[in-house]
Amino acid sequence: MGSDKTVIGIDIGTTSTKSVVFGMNGSVRGSCSIHYPLLHERPSWAEQDPDAIVEAVTRSVKGAIEQSGISGVDVAGASLSSAMHSVIAIDETGKPLTRSMTWADGRSEAEAQHIRQHVPDIYFRTGTPIHPMSPLPKLIWLRNNRTDVWERAAKFVSIKEYVLFVLFGQWAVDYSLASATGLLNGQQLDWDEQALRLAGLETGRLSPLQPGTYRMQGLSADYAQRMGLGKETPFFLGGSDGAMANIGVGAIGPGEMAVTIGTSAAVRMMMDRPLTDERQRTFCYHVADSSYVIGGAANNGGIVLQWLREKMFAGGGFAGAGGSGAAGIEGRGSVEALLEEAAKVSPGAEGLLFLPFLTGERAPIWNAEARGTFFGANLGHGRGHFVRAGLEGVMLGVLSVAHALEDLAGPAVEVRASGGFTKSLLWRQMLADMLGQRVSIPRVTEASALGAAAIAMQELGELGHWSDIKSWIPIDEVLEPSAAAAKVYRELLGIYTRLCGALAPAFAEIADLQRKRSG
């Protein structure tokens, strides 16, 4: 293939789909992002319109090709990354009977609690923590609460499966996505019999399992024209967004940890075998070949800073770390101003601690009823303390997951960080201080899209193996930890961990009260 050939990495996310055109050396030639709403018809529900996402995939591919200035004939192939844990009921004609229930949908909390109490060992076979994010309790909820849908449904699929069916008229699910459903046996890489019995499903109502390198060709003529691609352009299944992100940042080898903080947060390491945690703090999902990713995702990342800006300090708020009310810095409610004030406060926020559970929590506590909590506030704490405590709360959650991974796989030998949080020097330095070790910031714009593209490059013969892309990824910055700050954070983590356990009963009570008040 000539150097003018390209591949497209398509990343289907929670609020947008982004397509990126890559050269065969990993260079970005063009990109396009199309946004769509996350629908909250009822409290705790979080859905997407499946056809809106098909449209977003179509338009983003077209837009990325146009921005790159190439022709569709120069696209050698495409591969997909997708958010995990979505569920759509599909009728016998291939039409959706429901919206896509996303990972953020919490309606199946009662079903998850039932599984946790009566069949907790299922985690050790599937590697998927027992939590409402998982498709397993979502399916049980549908069976119990939407019998009309359950009886009419020919299949239950993820959003990526639906997109590919619309484009190619074929059902298939890659092992990477399937391993995050709570229905796949991680050792056997086949549907788990006990999980299927719990869900009340037969394998015929799920898509055939395929590796991420599986090729689809014969693109619908209409969609080929709308995307600007040839009908025979091959699409490869790729994998889940987390697995593809590890590839895309180059956290591939033993002991290489990836930390990603955007709206939410995740900590992941790759292994050559499936590995579960006896305390059920972490997930274990398939990546590709004989590779697995272990780790944990936290619900609350950059959304905490957004909440502080929009809800707590939109108009300037109360006094900062030595300020006097709303007077002073121009636009004190801006993110930049809040970060400036937080930076003036010493590590540990002078004893103010924040449990960042504004949207419940996943790893490592897996408690959908957990709620955000400031602890230790006194009259000396101002806006800067609260903002710093908010940022530190996110990082304490990340540190908790990192410690769980260390228990499982040993200490990290390298940490690579990516996501929107890296735009803040304060926040990225805080990660190094929390972990007490060096943190590298790779120059990667869209890690999940690049990881998916690497799968396509391998199958097209342009790359020996997807892991080879690590050599392409430059490091923009290396952050050294502060020993003094690390000592403070170790002490703070102990209090944080004990609070998470001690407040669990109160979390359940306040969550129940909130449901009653909002209902």
Image (spheres, grey):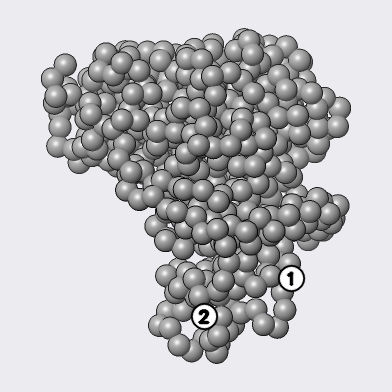
Residue 266 appearing in the image: yes
Question: Foreground: 50 or 428?
Answer: 428
Q: Residue 328: horizontal and vertical position, in percent?
A: 45, 88
* Callouts 1 and 2 close, C-beta under 8 Å: no
Question: Foreground: 391 or 189?
Answer: 391
Point 69% across, 50% down: residue: 360
Of helix, strand and loop, which one carries label 2?
A: loop
Q: Give the residue type at disc 2.
A: Gly
Vertical side of 246 occupied by 79: above or below? above
Q: Residue 226: horizontal and vertical position, in percent?
A: 26, 30
Q: CA distance from mark 1 to mark 2?
A: 22 Å
Q: Residue 519: horizontal and vertical position, in percent?
A: 76, 55
Mark number displayed over residue 155: none
Of the two numbered discs 1 and 2 on the same chain, state the one appearing first in sequence.
2
Residue count near mark 2 (Cα–Cα under 10 Å), binned few <14, some 14–19, many ≥20:
many
For label 2, the residue is: 316
In the displayed structure image, the side of residue 436 where residue 226 appears, left or right = left
Question: Foreground: 433 or 146?
Answer: 433
Point 80% across, 50% down: residue: 501
Question: Hey, which quadrant is residue 356 in on the image?
Answer: bottom right
Question: Hey, which quadrant is residue 322 in on the image?
Answer: bottom right
Point 61% across, 20% down: residue: 274
Residue count near mark 1 (Cα–Cα under 10 Å), binned few <14, some 14–19, many ≥20:
few
Question: Hey, which quadrant is residue 62 in on the image?
Answer: top left
For label 1, the residue is: 376
